[in-house]
Image: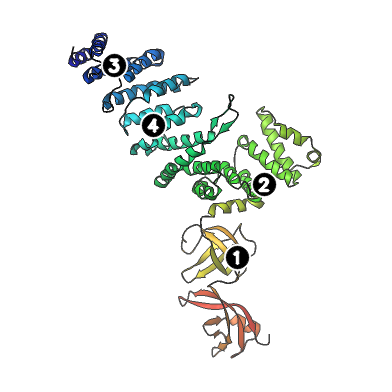
């Protein structure tokens, strides 16, 4: 009774005869590798035959038979072929209206006894199949740990195309799903009302997530989930730096600012500003009801009752529209005297505008501030020229940032990268607490006028004709003040010009 004869029967389509012969061979010598191998391929043929939902029990039965053979790890060809059949029926289960997770668990338990080639296309197919219904599968983390995210192939990190649309790679999907499940926690009561987060598991997962973020900076969402995981750990020191790259890319999505508010839970003013920014964005009202309720609570604590009523009325309107239940807290607020007497507004857009700049500045905390001096201001165009030193100077629009900047004022600013023909894009600006910079210097000395007396110098500091006329300055007069570094376009060189001036006797 040879394995060759069993193979010939298989290839001839005589599966029943091949099965009978394989079973007989195993009865004679169950530890013979050739007998095991021959039987495994017969079982595989039946597995392939029954790989459909209507014959699930038969499929599972032959999967058990293959598992019971306890083939050595190097018999990977059998296992890899089984992977395609297992993945196929798992995908079919995931597509049903009510996914039978009992069967999903049964298949995973059996699959976890197999020895696949890692990494391989077949092994990745197994992941995709079980991953499909991860949202409602309590065993997902156990599966992912067994499969091991280190086993993704280079191809698994590439975007895929489905129905003509680009979708994120299976690797990125896997890391996001794993993060979500960690944040979801494990139920510790019979009804799933109380859950516990496995902080040790998060700690061990974060380095893997860090590596993914570092090697795939084009992935948008991993930094977001890193921030959420750090928040779950209570690690406030690193959470903002982890979240900023994501927040900058998705700054026009309201939930980015909702999470930013969560990061600054202890700083109520910043949290308030983040809510303002979130609510200022164009977002369907259906998504904003929880955020508005949290914001309304903050407004009530600030005794901003008109603004609070405005938010509450928007919540009620949205919930009534969808016939959603009004929360008890909202109902209690509407019964209070302050609510009844407050005058609501059409919206709180003016309030949002007053505070959103403070929230936006959070995005640029990882960009170092630079000290600038205002050299010239065009109030009509709301553009100012600035100087830092001889190597860095230029101009930018201060519209929406400053009201009336003046020459000589010092500001701490953040710019978005390098200049374009001297123009800088401003990210943040605030009046500096520093009193001087390398672009300003104090001076004292005698004024030396030119022969016509139209202009002059104090050492290397230029005194323009208008100043001489206005202050009736004379040759050899002792003057002192402050000078600002300035570039002379005509002479194509740097020099100093008067910023403030005190003349002897004036």
Mark closest to the chain's N terminus, 3 or 4: 3
Quick check: marks 2 and 1 in contact, CB under 8 Å? no
Mark closest to the chain's N terminus, 1 or 4: 4
Q: Position of residue 210 (x, y in %)?
A: 44, 45
Crowding at dot 1, Cα within 10 Å, few <14 / some 14-19 / many 20+, comes out as: some
Mark closest to the chain's N terminus, 2 or 3: 3
Q: Identify which residue, 129 or 496, lies in the foreground.
A: 129
Q: Is residue 354 left or right of residue 158?
A: right
Q: Is residue 169 visible?
A: no
Secondary structure under the numbered disc 2 in the rendered image: helix
Q: CA distance from mark 1 to mark 3?
A: 77 Å
Secondary structure under the numbered disc 3 in the rendered image: helix
Across the whole image, how many numbered discs are drawn on residues? 4
Secondary structure under the numbered disc 1 in the rendered image: loop
User: What's the mark number on residue 432?
Assistant: 1
Q: Is residue 448 visible?
A: yes
In the picture of the structure, the residue carrying the numbered disc 2 is 349
In the picture of the structure, the residue carrying the numbered disc 3 is 45
Q: Is residue 136 above or below residue 150?
A: above
Q: CA distance from mark 3 to mark 4?
A: 25 Å
Q: CA distance from mark 2 to mark 3?
A: 67 Å
Q: Position of residue 179 (x, y in %)?
A: 48, 37
Which image quadrant for residue 83?
top left
In the picture of the structure, the residue carrying the numbered disc 4 is 147
Q: CA distance from mark 1 to mark 4?
A: 55 Å
């Amino acid at each position: 009774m040879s394995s060759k004869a069993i193979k010939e029967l298989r290839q001839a389509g005589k599966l029943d005869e091949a099965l009978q012969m394989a079973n007989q061979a195993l009865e004679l010598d169950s530890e013979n590798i050739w007998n095991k191998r021959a039987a495994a391929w017969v079982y595989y043929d039946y597995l392939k035959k029954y790989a459909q939902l209507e014959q699930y029990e038969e499929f599972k039965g032959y999967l058990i038979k293959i598992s019971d053979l306890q083939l050595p790890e190097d018999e990977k060809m059998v296992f890899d072929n089984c992977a395609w059949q297992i993945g196929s029926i798992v995908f079919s289960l995931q597509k049903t209206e009510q996914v039978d997770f009992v069967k999903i668990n049964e298949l995973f338990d059996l699959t976890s006894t197999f020895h696949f080639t890692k990494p391989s296309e077949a092994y990745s197919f197994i992941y995709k199949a079980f991953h499909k219904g991860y949202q409602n599968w309590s065993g997902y983390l156990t599966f992912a740990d067994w499969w091991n995210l280190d086993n993704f192939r280079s191809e698994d990190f590439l975007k895929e195309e489905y129905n003509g649309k680009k979708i994120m790679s299976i690797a990125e999907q896997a890391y996001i799903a794993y993060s979500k499940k960690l944040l979801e926690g494990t139920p510790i009561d019979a009804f799933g009302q109380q859950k516990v987060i496995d902080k040790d598991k998060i700690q061990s997962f974060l380095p893997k997530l860090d590596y993914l973020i570092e090697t795939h900076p084009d992935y948008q969402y991993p930094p977001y989930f890193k921030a959420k995981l750090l928040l779950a750990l209570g690690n406030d020191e690193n959470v903002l730096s982890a979240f900023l790259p994501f927040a900058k890319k998705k700054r026009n999505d309201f939930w980015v600012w909702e999470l930013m508010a969560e990061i600054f839970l202890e700083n109520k003013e910043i949290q308030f500003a983040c809510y303002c920014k979130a609510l200022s964005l164009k977002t369907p009202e259906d998504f904003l009801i929880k955020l508005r309720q949290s914001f309304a609570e903050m407004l009530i604590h600030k005794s901003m009752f008109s603004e609070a009523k405005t938010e509450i009325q928007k919540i009620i309107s949205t919930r009534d529209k969808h016939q959603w239940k009004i929360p008890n807290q909202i109902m209690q607020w509407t019964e209070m005297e302050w609510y009844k007497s407050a005058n609501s507004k059409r919206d709180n857009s003016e309030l949002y505008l007053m505070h959103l700049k403070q929230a936006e500045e959070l995005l640029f905390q990882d960009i170092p501030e630079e000290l600038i001096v205002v050299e010239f201001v065009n109030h009509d165009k709301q553009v100012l020229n600035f100087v830092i030193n001889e190597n860095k100077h230029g101009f930018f629009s201060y519209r929406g940032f400053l009201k009336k900047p003046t020459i000589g004022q010092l500001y701490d600013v953040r710019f978005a990268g390098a200049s374009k023909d001297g123009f800088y894009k401003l990210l943040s600006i605030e009046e500096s607490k520093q009193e001087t910079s390398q672009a300003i210097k104090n001076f004292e000395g005698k004024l030396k006028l030119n022969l016509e007396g139209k202009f002059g110098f104090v050492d290397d500091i230029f005194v323009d004709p208008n100043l001489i006329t206005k202050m009736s300055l004379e040759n050899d007069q002792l003057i002192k003040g402050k000078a600002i570094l300035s570039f002379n376009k005509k002479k194509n060189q740097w020099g100093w010009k008067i910023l403030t001036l005190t003349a002897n006797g004036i």
